[in-house]
Structures are given as C-alpha cells and as structure tokens.
Image (cartoon, rainbow, N blue to C red):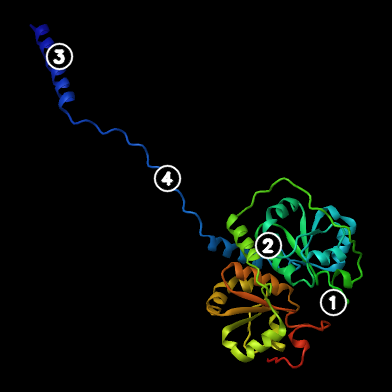
Amino acid sequence: MRKRTLSLLFSNLLIAGLLVTGCGQAQPAATQPAPAATAAAEDPAKIIKGAIQTYFNDIGSTVKNSYKISEKDLKTELDTSPDKYLVLDIRKADAYAQGHIKGAINIPYGPEIAKNLDSIRALAKDKTVIVACYTGQTAGQTDSLLNVAGIKTLSLNSGMGGASVGFATRGWIGQNYPTVTEPTTMPTAAKVESKNKAIDEAAQKYFYELPQDSYKIDLPAMKDALAKEADKYYIVDIRKAEDFAKGHIKGAVNIPYGPDIAKNLDSIKENGKNKTVVVYCYTGQTAGQADSLLNIYGIKTKSLNFGFGTEGFDKGWSADKSYEVVK
C-alpha cells in the first residue's frame, strides 16, 4: 500500500512539472551586452589649441632658445655633427641657387611645404630640422608649424641674411660662413606616421592659402593703416614687459612671448574679432612664430615686418624716428 502511494505521488509531481514547463511564460533570451559607445572624435579646434598652448608653455622651461639657433652655433653643429640635422632652405629657388648651406634642401616657403610635409617628417626622424629663410621671419612661421606637427625644428637666427636683404652683418651670409651652389636632391625615407592629422591639415592649409604678403605687414603700410583706420587692428606686442614699458606702438597690448600667449589665446581671439591682429617682437622672428599659430587657431593675424627693432638693429619700427612710439 505504501509502495503504491509513493508511486502515485511521484507520478503527480512529474505531471505537475510538465504542466508548469509547458504553460509557464517563456524566459527571455539572454541579451548581449550593449556595445560600448564609440568615443566622439575630439574637436580639431581643441587639439590645435592644446598644441599651441604646449608650444608656448614650453618656452623658458624645456625650450631655452625660443626655437631658434644662432648662426655661430649652427656652424659649430654642422662642423661637428652634421648627421643630427636636416637643413631646410625655404627661400625661392633662384636665391638658393646663388648660394646655400652645404647639404640644405630647397623647399620654397608656401604650398611646396604643404605638399612635402610628410617627406619632411620622414627625413627628420631622429634629427632636428633647421629652417633658413632670408631674414628669419618666414622661417619662424614655418618653425612653429612644424613643431606643433610633431617635427623638432629650429629656425636659423636672421636667416641667410647678407647685404642683398639689408643684413650686411647678420645671418649666415652676413657672418661670412661658407655657402655652396651645388643643389642637394631631396632623398627618400621611410614614412613616419603623423601624430595628429588635424594639425597637419591646419598647417597645410596655412601654406596652401599663402597670401601675397606672406602673412606679414610692412612698416609703412602699418603706419598708414594706424593713421587711417586704427580700429580695424588689434596690436599685440610680444616683447618683454620691461621693453614694452620703455616704448611701444600706440594702442598695443603687451602679451610677452611664451606662456603668457598660451594663457591669453582666447582673449586675443575675442579682442581680435572682426579685426586683423598684428603681432610684433624685436626683429620679426618670434612674431613670425606667433603669427602662424594664431592663424591656424582661426585668428586672422599678420606679423610686423622687422618688428619693433632693438639695439644694434637698424630696421624695425623704432629705427625710423618718424614712427610714433609711446610709453
């Protein structure tokens, strides 16, 4: 009897289990975890701003030479360690043909630099690029753009110089250092990947869209413009504060070359809205650096040709006593 009872109990439990399985709601299939959201691409303007700020913030700390090299120091370096350098002569082909630094490659300032940016990066691997122009100003513009594009670069102080550009005792030729006329063919090198395409594109755009004035304004043109329509310009003096205090162009604000420019990028952009920003330094060379970087940040900028001037330099705004200087 007991055996029969247990058998019936087991049968009932089995039937109940089948009924529950058949009539119960189907369990939802296990869901796959949602794929992680793809990170939004970083804003190119933010990338460019960060690179510019790093460039200026490094001045005085990791960068002691204002991204320049003196004529004498370059001569010494090329005599002792030429393989550590790639000399880039950005003057026009005819000037290069008349005489250049031995081993220098000619890539004229403007669209040719944009076209050859990848080649320059490849050739510059494990080297420092030295950029030489006529007086150092367009080399400064090039210097800063190559640096933010990840290519270690210095500009030659006062460029090739020489009497033909009014630098009788300045620059490589003015210092009577040797030149050659035999051209150096651009070698080939394995491609080096860019660290940031947004910066490359901004730098290339700068060179491809090179205006006739090369992003510079001559002294007479600046004097005339300030006399007739000063409100169309925002003048930034990037010399040291003590030199600004001794005398500067009327209406200029002082934002010294270096970290102060990094801190004031947005202020320059706001104050320069609907105007042309004009940057000047002592001789035009560091202003050239600032000029190109402000332009790729979207600030319409020109550098003052030959700058404000300095002791022993017979060019620049202060060299002509007819140009107004205020304190």
How many C-alpha atoms fall within 10 Å of the one at disc 4: few (<14), some, or many (≥20)?
few
The answer to whether marks 4 and 2 mark residues whose Cβ atoms lie closer than 8 Å is no
Residue under label 2, please give it. Answer: 111
The residue tagged with tag 4: helix, strand or loop? loop
User: In the image, what residue occupies the spot 60% across and 62% down?
Assistant: 202
| Left or right: residue 134 compared with residue 324 | right
The answer to which quarter of the image holds residue 277 is bottom right
Marks 2 and 3 sit apart, C-alpha to C-alpha, by: 91 Å
Tag nearer the camera, 1 or 4:
1
Type of residue at label 2? Answer: Pro
The residue tagged with tag 2: helix, strand or loop? helix
Instruction: Tell me which numbered mark, 2 or 3, is placed earlier along the sequence.
Output: 3
The answer to whether marks 1 and 4 mark residues whose Cβ atoms lie closer than 8 Å is no
Residue under label 4, please give it. Answer: 36
How many C-alpha atoms fall within 10 Å of the one at disc 1: few (<14), some, or many (≥20)?
many
Residue under label 3, please give it. Answer: 10
Marks 3 and 4 sit apart, C-alpha to C-alpha, by: 50 Å
Question: Residue 321 at what x, y percent from top left?
Answer: 76, 92
Instruction: Tell me which numbered mark, 3 or 4, is placed earlier along the sequence.
Output: 3
The residue nearer to you, when weighing 120 against 114, is: 114
Tag nearer the camera, 4 or 2:
2
Type of residue at label 4? Answer: Ala
User: In the image, what residue occupies the spot 62% across and 53% down?
Assistant: 195
The residue tagged with tag 1: helix, strand or loop? loop
Marks 4 and 2 sit apart, C-alpha to C-alpha, by: 42 Å
Residue under label 1, please give it. Answer: 167
